[in-house]
């Protein structure tokens, strides 16, 4: 019975997570389209975007299109920058090395209820940021820049522009992601000066070779490594036992000590979890000279106020009951807009295509989410490659360049055939691929520099495989068939 209940809870949480990813994908796709129209589409095709009819588009190149000779700044660049920034802003405390454990986002206090909305966090990171950014459209723009559109074939002179387009795309998105992380830390230090002081003190002790176990409660986390920060007043008769434990474990608390993992396990078991250690662990503590009796006495006399467990009625009510109808209603509205708007003028075609694209966005994002399960599951020498993200970006790039090539080569006078190709490219492929996750993975790999260069290798593999595959496909469809 318990197994079935646990399985049902897991499946329910997975379903709700998928719903939030779908919602985030629709919002992200909507804003990506808006930004692309603002920075490119109205420049390329004047008079097709109704809300920009006043003539206020922000053209990013000669005509807003990447097929322009100098159009290395593609229209979706700004969506990639915004999505990567939000992804960095949503970085967890562990990723930003904040001393407090379990912080889902660092720009809010540790006791804020949003810290526990894990399903919403996934919806923002995987759904919103993943669909707001697009690798496939960026890659397709670079392939068109390389080849031309069928009549202006000048591949010999466009290598440099294409290289610059890829370089600008990677560097600006990565820089935007890092800036998002930095902004999160700025807000954290402004809102939580005490935690900022603890982080500075912990860094100073680490430089002195002392390890900090941030999984311990606040008092012990600060007291045991002797951090230079204020601690609450405690009964002197009790604190002497913790001091005896600290002195007896001083050598084991240093970086490089073989006993450090064991010491952290003992402290987490007794202090954090309030459980007794095994007889084997007790004997090992005695052999190492650890004053385990003093630690036990401290735990019996300990009287330190601990933060109460956060109550999250949002998780119990709105997350479970509100998201599914909302997603269904939004998809229904997209279908209504797609079917009911029957005019053939440029404005109507643009808005119907937007509805079509936004309606397909959840399917691309959900497929990417499922493919992410392959990240870290490939064994051998290439286990460091996020195979799920790489597969999603490659698959999306192939679908994007195929639909673009067919649309460019064949064309259509009918709305449904042309709109389906564009919606597959903008909505499905644009949401299946991601730049925000791509740059976050690169940033994580670059922490190993200069010992490892996996981040730059990952960039070359992703751009090389996607670019080469799509270049062959586009060239064959547009210039051979």
Image (cartoon, grey):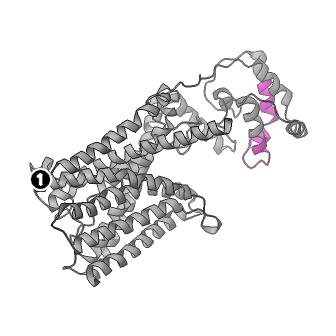
Asked whether residue 42 is drawn in magenta, I would say no
Between 161 and 413, the residue placed more toward the observer is 413
Left or right of 390 in this view: 406:
left
Q: Is residue 249 left or right of residue 87?
A: right
Q: Residue at x 37, y 61 (%)?
A: 135
- Pinpoint residue 59: horizontal percent, then vertical percent: 18, 57
Q: Label 1 belongs to which residue? A: 343
Quarter of the figure that contains the C terminus: bottom left
What residue sits 55% from the left and 42% below the top? 11
User: What residue do we see at 19% from left, 51% from top?
Assistant: 351
The correct choice, above or below, for 212 with respect to 341 in the image is: above
The image position of residue 343, as x and y in percent, is 11, 53
Residue at far front of view: 1
329 lies above or below 421: above
Characterize the local packing of mark 1: few (<14), some (14-19) or many (20 or more) Cα atoms within 10 angstroms. Answer: few
Residue 13 at what x, y percent from top left? 52, 40
Q: Position of residue 445 (x, y in %)?
A: 54, 58
Q: Is residue 290 left or right of residue 463?
A: right
Label 1 sits on a secondary structure element that is: loop
Q: Quadrant of residue 271?
A: top right
Magenta region? 241-262
Residue nearest the viewer, comparing 288 with 90: 90
Q: How many marks?
A: 1
Residue 242 on the magenta segment: yes
Q: On screen, 156 above or below 341?
A: below
Dominant SS in magenta: helix
Q: Which residue is pictured at 23% across the width and 60% down the height?
A: 419
Q: Place residue 417 in its image quadrant.
A: bottom left
Image quadrant holding the N terminus, namely top right
Closer to us: 322 or 127? 322
């Amino acid at each position: 019975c318990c197994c079935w209940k646990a399985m049902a809870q897991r499946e329910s949480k997975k379903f709700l997570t998928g719903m939030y990813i779908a919602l985030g994908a629709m919002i992200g796709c909507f804003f990506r389209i808006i930004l692309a129209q603002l920075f490119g589409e109205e420049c390329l095709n004047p008079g097709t975007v109704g809300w920009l009819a006043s003539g206020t588009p922000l053209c990013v190149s000669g005509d807003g299109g990447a097929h322009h000779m100098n159009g290395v700044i593609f229209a979706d660049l700004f969506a990639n920058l915004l999505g990567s920034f939000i992804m960095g802003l949503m970085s967890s405390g562990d990723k930003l090395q904040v001393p407090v454990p379990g912080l889902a986002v660092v720009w809010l206090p540790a006791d804020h209820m949003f810290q526990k909305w894990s399903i919403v966090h996934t919806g923002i990171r995987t759904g919103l940021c993943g669909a707001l950014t697009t690798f496939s459209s960026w890659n397709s723009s670079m392939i068109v820049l390389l080849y031309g559109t069928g009549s202006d074939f000048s591949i010999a002179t466009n290598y440099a522009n294409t290289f610059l387009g890829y370089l600008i795309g990677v560097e600006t998105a990565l820089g935007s992601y890092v800036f998002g992380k930095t902004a999160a830390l700025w807000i954290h230090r402004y809102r939580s000066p005490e935690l900022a002081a603890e982080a500075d003190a912990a860094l100073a002790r680490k430089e002195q070779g002392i390890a900090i176990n941030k999984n311990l409660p606040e008092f012990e986390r600060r007291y045991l490594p002797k951090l230079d920060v204020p601690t609450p007043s405690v009964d002197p008769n009790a604190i002497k036992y913790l001091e005896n434990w600290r002195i007896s474990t001083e050598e084991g608390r240093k970086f490089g000590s073989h006993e450090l993992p064991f010491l952290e396990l003992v402290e987490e078991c007794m202090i954090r979890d309030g459980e007794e250690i095994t007889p084997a662990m007790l004997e090992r503590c005695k052999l190492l000279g650890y004053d385990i009796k003093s630690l036990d006495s401290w735990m019996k006399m300990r009287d330190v106020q601990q933060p109460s467990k956060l109550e999250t009625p949002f998780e119990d009510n709105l997350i479970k009951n509100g998201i599914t109808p909302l997603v269904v209603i939004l998809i229904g509205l997209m279908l209504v807009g797609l079917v009911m708007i029957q005019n053939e003028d440029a404005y109507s075609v643009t808005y119907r295509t937007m509805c079509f694209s936004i309606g397909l966005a959840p399917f691309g994002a959900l497929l990417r989410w499922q493919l992410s399960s392959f990240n870290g599951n490939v064994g051998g020498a290439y286990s460091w490659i996020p195979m799920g993200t790489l597969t999603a970006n490659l698959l999306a790039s192939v679908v994007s360049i195929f639909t673009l090539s067919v649309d460019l080569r064949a064309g259509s006078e009918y709305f449904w055939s042309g709109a389906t190709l564009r919606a597959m490219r903008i909505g499905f492929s644009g949401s299946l691929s991601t730049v925000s996750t791509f740059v976050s993975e690169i940033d994580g790999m670059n922490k190993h520099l200069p010992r490892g260069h996996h981040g730059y290798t990952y960039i070359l593999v992703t751009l090389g495989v996607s670019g080469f595959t799509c270049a062959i496909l586009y060239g064959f469809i547009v210039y051979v068939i």
